[in-house]
Image (tube, rainbow, N blue to C red):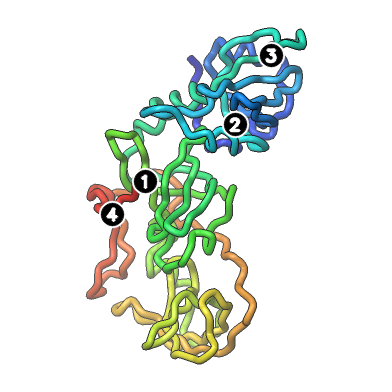
Amino acid sequence: MSEQNFFPEGLSADASRRYYARAVLERAMQSGAILEAPAVLCDADLSLTVALGEMQGIIPRDEVVYEREGSGKDIAVITRVGKTVCFCVQGFFTGADGRPRALLSRRAAQKRCAEEYLAKLRPGDVIPAKVTHMEQFGAFCDVGCGIISLLSVDAVSVSRIAHPRDRFFEGMQILAAVRQVDKESGRLYLSHKELLGTWLENAAQFSAGETVRGIVRSIEDYGIFVELTPNLAGLAERREGVLVGQSAAVYIKSILPDRMKIKLSLIDICHAQMPRRALTYFIRGGHIDTWVYSPPGCKKTVETDFSVPRADRLP
């Protein structure tokens, strides 16, 4: 079997390919290679039709989703239409119209990904992922061949957000760190904030005396927290009429590493919401054992120890 890289669906070199000659499909069947193409139809039997160019491919209902316990939900099949899907070629047959068809299995591709790639990951490994959909409690991410892992909202960034859509959009390519591995189910749980820089790395982008743009993230009795970067926020004085999500111009009064604080003065508010910030990754691969966010000498230590399982894991 050939060496295989396992990408989130739509991110492999084949993702934009729209034509597979039969000879290519036959070689893929012999080698066990994982290919990708768009699903264009889900029929009444919940089988997927995949556009291969020279011929159509069929993924039977039971071959769409790899589930260790029981079969996948119908919605997991229906929602593949119009999207790129991965698959292994299982064989060929003649359709009712007399035309050749390729018999495909997404399940086989996912099973191989789970056993050869995901099963070898450990907490602290940094991997590519793609955001597939979001709920208030977190973002669901494709970590390989359409296999989904959860990134909880509190692990997206140090600067707190109300919803993952404040940071991501569906289809967005991101990096993530494996936070926990459930050995019984094989599921991965992800984190993200550790890749966005420490307090010092983010604070180094600013200087006292500057006026910069930020996003209002929370309003408390004692002040307004304004996000300067996804992993850095400062505190400004309260002002009436300010709303969470608004863009703010703030004057940086002081930067205090020993207290891990930035003092701000609110200059102006833009009543339109600020566009989503582009993400800057300070860690782009490899493995993290322990990540320390707080500056050296700071009384408060903020860190992530990837050897310690999270107790608040979501199902």
Residue 312: mark in rendering: 4
Give how far across and how far down residue 12 sits, in percent: 59, 34
Position of 132 relative to 292 (above/below)? above
- Amino acid found under the numbered disc labelled 4: Asp
Q: Please name which of the two marks, 4 or 1, marks the residue nearer to the observer.
A: 4
Q: Report which residue position mark 1 lands on.
A: 189
Question: Left of 58 or right of it: where is 31?
Answer: left
Residue 179 appears in the rendering: yes
Which residue does the image show at 35% across and 31% down from the upper left? 119
Sequence-earlier tag: 4 or 3: 3
Question: Left of 275 or right of it: where is 187?
Answer: left
Q: Determine whether label 1 and label 3 are within 8 Å by CB.
A: no
Question: Left of 69 or right of it: where is 162?
Answer: right
Sequence-earlier tag: 4 or 1: 1
Q: Determine whether label 2 and label 1 are within 8 Å by CB.
A: no
Residue 85: mark in rendering: 2
Residue 70: mark in rendering: none
- Amino acid found under the numbered disc labelled 3: Arg
Residue 193 is drawn in which quadrant? bottom left
Which residue does the image show at 55% across and 90% down from the upper left? 267
Sequence-earlier tag: 1 or 3: 3
Q: Please name which of the two marks, 1 or 3, marks the residue nearer to the observer.
A: 3
Residue 101: mark in rendering: 3
